């Protein structure tokens, strides 16, 4: 009985060249490279699961699309300034290395 199954996949030429380059560099088979790539993909996918948007998320996305279509946009720099201003609180600066005596 066979302990593995055959996978046939098409790759763009530049990706195949990279596979061949790594195969020679690391003294591995194509199968080993593909198995490792898939293990890494599965691990990343498990760690960073996609979340389904809530109804409120979808409404906000839709409203944003409508605002954009109506030309209600602001420059990125302004949006970043506003965002930065909301999340960043200033604090008193103290000289480094000086301790209260």
Image (cartoon, rainbow, N blue to C red):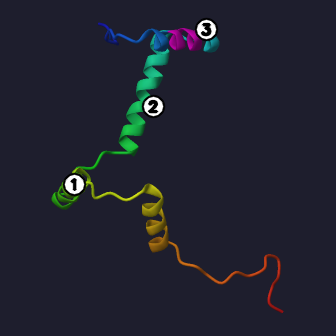
On the image, the x and y values in percent for residue 64 come to 25, 56
Residues marked 1 and 3 touching at CB (< 8 Å) = no
Q: Residue furthest bottom?
A: 101
For disc 2, the marked residue is 40
Indicate which disc, 1 or 3, sits on the residue closer to the N terminus. 3
Q: Is residue 13 left or right of residue 27?
A: left
Task: Write down the quadrant of residue 91 in the picture.
Answer: bottom right
Up-down: is 11 above or below 56? above
Q: Which residues are magenta?
A: 17-24
Q: Which residue is mark 3?
A: 24
User: What secondary structure is found at the residue carrying circle 3?
Assistant: helix
Q: CA distance from mark 1 to mark 3?
A: 55 Å
Q: Residue furthest front?
A: 71
Q: Would you say residue 21 sits in the magenta stretch?
A: yes
**Callout 3 crowding tier (Cα within 10 Å): few <14, some 14–19, many ≥20:** few
Q: Considering only order in the chain, which callout, 2 or 1, is on the residue closer to the N terminus?
A: 2
User: How far is the residue under mark 3 from the one under mark 2?
Assistant: 20 Å
Quadrant for the N terminus, please.
Answer: top left
> Secondary structure of the magenta portion, mostly?
helix
* Distance from the alpha carbon under mark 1 to that under mark 2: 43 Å
- Mark 2 burial class by Cα count in 10 Å: few <14, some 14-19, many 20+: few
Q: What label does residue 70 carry, if any? A: 1
- Residue 42: % across, % down: 38, 33
Point 43% across, 20% down: residue: 35
Local crowd at mark 1 within 10 Å, few (<14), some, or many (≥20)?
few
Residue drawn at 82 percent across, 77 percent down: 97
Instruction: Please give left or right for residue 71 compared with residue 93 in the image.
Output: left
- Residue at figure coordinates x 36%, y 41% from the top left: 46
Q: Nearer the viewer, mark 1 or mark 2?
A: 1
């Amino acid at each position: 009985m066979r302990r593995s199954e055959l996978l046939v996949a098409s790759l763009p030429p530049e990706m195949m060249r990279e596979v061949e380059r790594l195969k020679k560099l690391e003294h591995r088979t194509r199968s080993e490279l593909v198995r490792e790539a898939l293990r890494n993909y599965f691990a990343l996918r498990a760690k960073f699961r996609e979340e389904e948007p809530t109804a409120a998320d979808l409404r906000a996305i839709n409203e944003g699309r409508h605002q954009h279509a109506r030309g209600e946009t602001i420059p990125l720099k302004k949006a970043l300034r506003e965002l930065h201003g909301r999340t960043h609180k200033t604090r008193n600066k103290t000289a480094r290395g000086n301790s209260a005596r």
